[in-house]
């Protein structure tokens, strides 16, 4: 079950197709055979015992550093309790979490526990490794990372699989995570959040922005989507590279690859198979997505998708013909900007505006419902004066309850009336933007 080696980048891209799965899915068998019990680490965190009831508490950069140095804890549970800043660290004094040495290496050991970011931020992760395969805050993951904000990371690799948060997501999930203002650069399979998604893993309810660059399979959020799913996520990152370059993902490479209910708004630049959403849909399916970024390239250039192989599916997708500068695409339907901001355009493609999408018509493109901040009553465009006018109209209302959806949400604290405590909550969200 060992995949062929990734070939030299100068070979024609069609020749690359058998290796689209990358390497990271094939490690499991080796892992179970090769892992020896590790001695219990005398790890010092800010509390907890690593169980689901009492996760290890991470409240300082030093706590975080300890995780990377404690492979025996990589199956444990962690919870970030404070925003932390990794400015004082780099590849010289910080270990990535989870280990990938090489294909088939007995040293490979993923992070298979749970890291709960608890809505907190890890800022200024800077890491450069030009010799390792898979580079990221987490190098190699089969567990779960959730509710984590990565801000201002600068991650540089030069081999297979570079991602701001995770190099190789071999199994498991990345849920409600973001990579904001990141700069990620690498060679093959480069993504703002995750380099490669494999093994049935999922990335969902996540987003990225910043600048992402590489040679092949480069995407704003994920470089290579192999056997795995990317859903309800988006990227606004600027993406540059040579082949299979996309605003959201570089390539979908397996029959089981799924990209569902996602969008990309960053500009994309490359040489071949360059597109607003996915550079190359080599296999699998891309459903109910859109893209708007300016696309520039030489061959196989498309508004939404640059290259689509015969058995791959692109369904219910759209791109902005005006903002992309591209009148054509191998998949999807092109619409002018004005129509891309109308719900009917998307309803005609059977998009779900009950649970998945929402739109501030005529103002914005559709966004995902989870992006709406508290207090954004009127038009999902952020909390501003129009929302205040709406809140003020409910002021002193006293009949709030389930029947009127807590006065349409104005009774934030569900006390039954709209009064000063609700105003304080509204004020705390004042000018909150859509994520
Ligand atoms: Ca609003
Ligand atoms: Ca109230």
Image: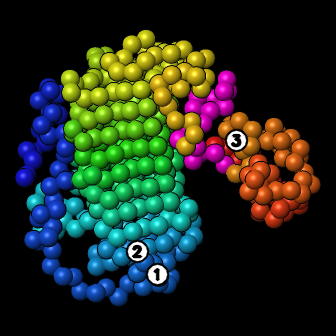
Question: Which numbered marker is on residue 53?
Answer: 1
Is residue 118 left or right of 129 when viewed as pictured? right
Vertical order, 413 against 408 (above or below)? below
Alpha-carbon span between mark 1 and mark 3: 36 Å
Residue to which mark 2 is pinned:
77
Label 1 packing within 10 angstroms: few (<14), some (14-19), many (20+): few
Q: Nearer the viewer, residue 100 or 364?
A: 364
Magenta-drawn segment: 356-373
| Image spot of residue 260 (x, y percent) | 40, 38
- Residue 141 to residue 384: above or below: below
- Residue 62 picture location, percent across and down: 46, 75
Residue placed under numbered mark 3 in the picture: 382
Give the CA distance from mark 3 to mark 2. Answer: 34 Å
Q: Which of the four quarters of the rendered structure image does ligand 1 lie in?
A: top right
Q: Residues within 10 Å of mark 2 (few under 14, many from 20)?
A: many
Q: Is mark 3 within 8 Å of ligand 1?
A: yes
Going by the picture, which residue comes out furthest to the top?
327
Q: Is mark 2 within 8 Å of ligand 2?
A: no
């Amino acid at each position: 079950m060992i995949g062929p080696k990734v070939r030299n980048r100068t070979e024609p891209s069609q020749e690359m197709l058998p290796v689209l799965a990358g390497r990271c899915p094939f490690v499991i068998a080796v892992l179970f055979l090769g892992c020896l019990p590790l001695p219990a680490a005398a790890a010092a965190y800010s509390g907890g015992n690593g169980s689901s009831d009492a996760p290890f508490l991470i409240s300082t950069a030093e706590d975080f550093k300890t995780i990377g140095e404690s492979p025996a804890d990589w199956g444990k549970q962690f919870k970030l309790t404070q925003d932390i800043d990794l400015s004082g660290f780099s590849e010289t004094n910080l270990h990535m979490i989870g280990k990938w040495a090489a294909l088939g290496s007995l040293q490979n050991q993923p992070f298979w526990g749970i890291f709960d970011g608890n809505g907190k931020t890890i800022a200024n992760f800077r890491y450069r490794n030009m010799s390792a395969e898979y580079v990221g805050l987490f190098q190699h993951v089969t567990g779960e990372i959730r509710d984590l904000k990565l801000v201002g990371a600068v991650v540089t690799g030069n081999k297979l699989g570079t991602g701001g948060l995770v190099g190789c997501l071999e199994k498991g999930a990345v849920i409600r995570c973001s990579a904001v203002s990141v700069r990620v650069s690498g060679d093959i399979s480069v993504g703002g959040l995750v380099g490669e998604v494999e093994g049935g893993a999922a990335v969902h309810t996540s987003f990225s922005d910043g600048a992402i660059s590489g040679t092949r399979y480069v995407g704003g959020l994920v470089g290579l989507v192999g056997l795995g799913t990317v859903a309800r996520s988006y990227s606004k990152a600027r993406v540059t590279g040579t082949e299979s370059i996309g605003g959201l993902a570089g390539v979908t490479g397996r029959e089981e690859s799924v990209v569902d209910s996602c969008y990309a708004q960053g500009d994309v630049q490359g040489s071949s198979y360059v597109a607003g959403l996915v550079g190359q849909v080599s296999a699998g399916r891309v459903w109910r997505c859109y893209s708007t970024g300016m696309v520039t390239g030489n061959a196989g250039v498309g508004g939404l998708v640059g290259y689509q192989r015969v058995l791959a599916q692109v369904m219910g997708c759209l791109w902005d013909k005006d903002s992309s500068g591209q009148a054509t695409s191998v998949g999807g339907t092109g619409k002018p900007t004005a129509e891309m901001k109308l719900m009917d355009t998307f309803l005609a493609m059977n998009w779900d505006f009950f649970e998945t999408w929402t739109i501030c018509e005529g103002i914005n493109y559709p966004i995902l419902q989870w992006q709406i901040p508290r207090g954004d009553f009127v038009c999902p465009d952020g909390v501003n004066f129009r929302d205040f006018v709406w809140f003020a109209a409910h002021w002193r209302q006293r009949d709030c309850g389930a029947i009127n959806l807590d006065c349409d949400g104005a009774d934030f604290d569900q006390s039954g009336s709209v009064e000063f405590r609700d105003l304080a909550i509204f004020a705390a969200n004042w000018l909150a933007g859509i994520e």
